Image (spheres, rainbow, N blue to C red):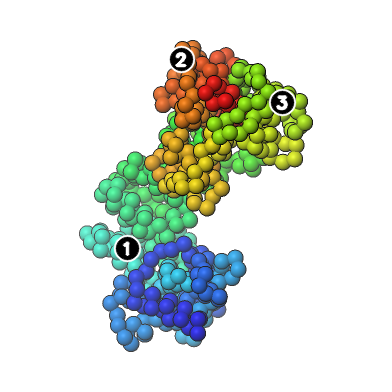
Amino acid sequence: MKNKILLCAALSAMLFGSVSFAASTIDTVSYDVSSKTLRVSGTADSNELYDLNMVTIQVLRPGVTPETLKDMAGEEKKRAVAFVNQTEIMGDGTYSFVYSPKTIEYGNHNIYVTDPNGEAIYKTVLFTDSEKNSELLRDINSASTAQLAKAVLEKHSYLLDGVKSIDDIKTMYPDKDIIGSAAAMMAGKQYESSGQVAEYAVKCAVTSAVNFAADKEEFKRILDTYQVELGFDSNKIYKELFLDIADDIADRFISRDYKDPEEFETDFCDSVIISRFNRLKNYAGIPAILNAGRDWLKAFDFEKYDKLTDTEKADVQKELINGAPYTTVEQIKTVFNNCLNKTPQNNGTGGGGGGGGSRPSSSSSSSSAAGVAINTGNTQKNDIFNDISGVEWARESIIALYKAGIIDGVSEGKFEPNALVTREQFVKMLVCTYGLENADAKCSFEDVEANSWYYGYVAAACEAGIVNGISDVLFGTGQNITREDMAVMAYRAALFGNTAFKNGAESFADDEKIYDYAKEAVYALKAEGVMTGKENNLFAPKDFATRAEAAKIIYGLICLEGIS
């Protein structure tokens, strides 16, 4: 009975409800001409109310679109569905479906998949046979001009009949020859199947719409509406790098005349990546760019990059940001690969590298505002970690904070002092140090999930006014914290703990590289000896902070008057 209810609910959503795009996906949909078999596969969200989760798959008849289906009723609506069935969602969230119709109805069929939550997604697939497929391929592969290619599309009109995006674009630009424009892009190319011809024709039509876009709002709307047709639904550059800067860079794609979808995709992806690099204010955003662009940046030596330590990767990222501004992806690649070919230098060690605090503790113990007991007496002997001999300047801090439960090792006997610290990791240290835990605290950053281990720490720090995000909606989860941002957070936490700071610290040699919002914090911490610079009186504000540096600063705050 439960399965029958599920089937009825799915059919109701498809036949009488609205279509919405959900987390469920159709990853592949294909029709094999020789075996006359349709194959559909993808992923689907389950519904915890059901013991057996199924997806409903419907094959609509040629010419039936989402809009025409809504206008139908009764028997007409039932006849519009050529086939309907269900298949089980597997344990890994995937589903697959095979359909071999007894008779072939030539043309485009919309394939609908409805998950157990009633959410529906669809794609279009062309049904044909071997004879028609051979005729089409013979005609289109010999069409060397735009005029000939258009004649082929008109002769084989079933290719594009009932394709929603084509109808939409024709309505959007009634004075434009959409089919002729698509044909011009298709001419002179070779195709292997009728399905490939149909899919590419639609992609060319959407690219034509991109060319016709009058302004950036229209351009953004085309990409959003037809991201599946363009292949942008799985394009990380579009999803992760473009959308939040779309208003700033969409203008550059207006009044262009892209000759085919490949030219548009190349210009789009390259332009977004270049813009992202040129907009960076520090190194923190580089990992996100490299991760999103990895599949596109084929000439980048990611195999070698992936083998680097975090500190070595930071060195590469520094070179990348120092090489900006860029005008081509080739320039970025050159900097990236050349840096990898150098012998990596581990700059995370060195006397006073991060904390540099010179304030010793004369007492045997002190406590933070949270009441955490800090043993500052017998901490010089390293009986906990066997990898901190290279950071003698941070040894006391590391051991004291470990014994107080504020920081942990990464494994038995290992602290990894030169590993980098993320923004949420440093926030946790501050919250634990100052006793800011607040079970009722809330935050609304999109990248701070409510069920994450760091949500409570970030929320508590937000309510205390200690942290801000990297934007109005993002905290910067997973990004390595810069030295200047670490100083700002530490300073705000100390002020929250009623610590009084001195004035009058001398400027660092690279003062002009410190953002204005961070200067008060940097020099207040310098005046107290909590945070000093590196060699040659450099603060290196954009460098990523290491675990040893973070420990030194936290310990320095604890030792300040007013917190102990």
**Residue 329, image x, y percentages:** 48, 38
Circle 1: element type? helix
Answer whether residue 297 is visible to the viewer in this image: no
Q: Vertically, is 165 above or below 265?
A: below
Q: Amino acid at mark 2?
A: Asn
Tell me if label 3 and label 2 are in contact, CB under 8 Å: no
Circle 2: element type? loop
- In the drawing, what numbered circle is on residue 179? 1
Instruction: Answer left or right for 316 relative to 505.
Output: right
User: Which circle's residue, 1 or 2, is located before the other in the chain?
Assistant: 1
Q: Vertically, is 371 above or below 146?
A: above
Q: Amino acid at mark 1?
A: Ile
Circle 3: element type? loop
Identify the residue under disc 2: 503
Residue for point 67% across, 28% down: 375
Q: Quadrant of residue 305?
A: top right
Residue for point 39% across, 47% down: 243
User: Which circle's residue, 3 or 1, is located before the other in the chain?
Assistant: 1
Q: Vertically, is 16 above or below 25?
A: below
Alpha carbons under labels 3 and 2: distance apart: 30 Å
Structural crowding at the residue carrying mark 3, measured as other residues with C-alpha within 10 Å and reported as few (<14), some (14–19) or many (≥20): some
Tell me if label 3 and label 1 are in contact, CB under 8 Å: no
Identify the residue under disc 3: 379
Out of 560 and 453, give the one closest to the viewer: 560
Answer whether residue 260 is visible to the viewer in this image: yes
Q: Amino acid at mark 3?
A: Thr
Alpha carbons under labels 3 and 1: distance apart: 77 Å
